Amino acid sequence: MFGNPIEIPELDELHAMPVAGFEHFDEFEERGEAGVQTSWTRRVKLVDRTPYILMLGKYLNAFPMTKHPTVLPPTQPRHDLSKLTADEWEQYQRWKEP
């Protein structure tokens, strides 16, 4: 898990595909006339997968483009008006008038 990473040219094609770039830094200390390498740093930058995941989601229709109404209109009246008494019917008619 830890230790020296595999060199970029030694990676197989499957593992080399997500590598976008890398940097290598050697750090030296001056001791007398010559410098001595004290450490090195290797940074590996991976490819950003976000655009590819969005393209795949659009292809698979994971993000539908059509907007559906949140509330569907009723297909039939909410109340059965045939069961109203004569007084209730008159009251309903007066309420319905503008």
Image (tube, rainbow, N blue to C red):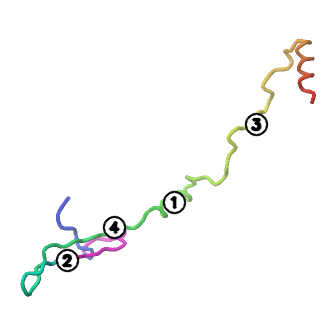
Image quadrant of residue 49?
Answer: bottom left
Counting residues from the start of the chain, the first of labels 3 and 2 encountered is: 2
* Range of magenta residues: 10-27
Determine crowd level at label 1: few under 14, some 14-19, many 20+ residues with C-alpha closer than 10 A. Answer: few
Real-space Cα distance between discs 2 and 1?
Answer: 38 Å
Magenta span contains residue 23: yes
Give residue 20's position: percent from left, percent from top.
37, 72
In depth, the one of 44 and 36 nearer the eye is: 36
The residue where tag 3 is placed is 73
| Secondary structure found at label 2 | strand
User: Sequence-wise, which precedes: disc 1 or disc 3?
Assistant: 1
- Residue 85 location (% of width, % of height): 88, 12
Q: Which residue is mark 2?
A: 26
Q: Earlier in the sequence, mark 4 or mark 1?
A: 4
Considering only order in the chain, which callout, 2 or 4, is on the residue closer to the N terminus? 4
Q: Which residue is mark 4?
A: 14
- Distance (Cα) linking label 4 and label 1: 21 Å
What residue sits 72% from the left and 38% below the top? Answer: 72
Residue 2: percent from the left, percent from the top?
18, 60
Q: Which residue is mark 1?
A: 54
Hey, what amino acid is under mark 4? Leu
Q: Nearer the viewer, residue 9 or 19?
A: 19
Mark 2 / mark 1, whichever is N-terminal: 2
- Which residue is found at the position 85% from the left and 20% from the top? 81
Question: In the rendered structure, which amino acid carries the disc numbered 3?
Answer: Pro
Query: Mark 3: which secondary structure?
Result: loop
Position of residue 91 in the picture relative to residue 1 (left or right): right
Element assignment for label 4:
helix
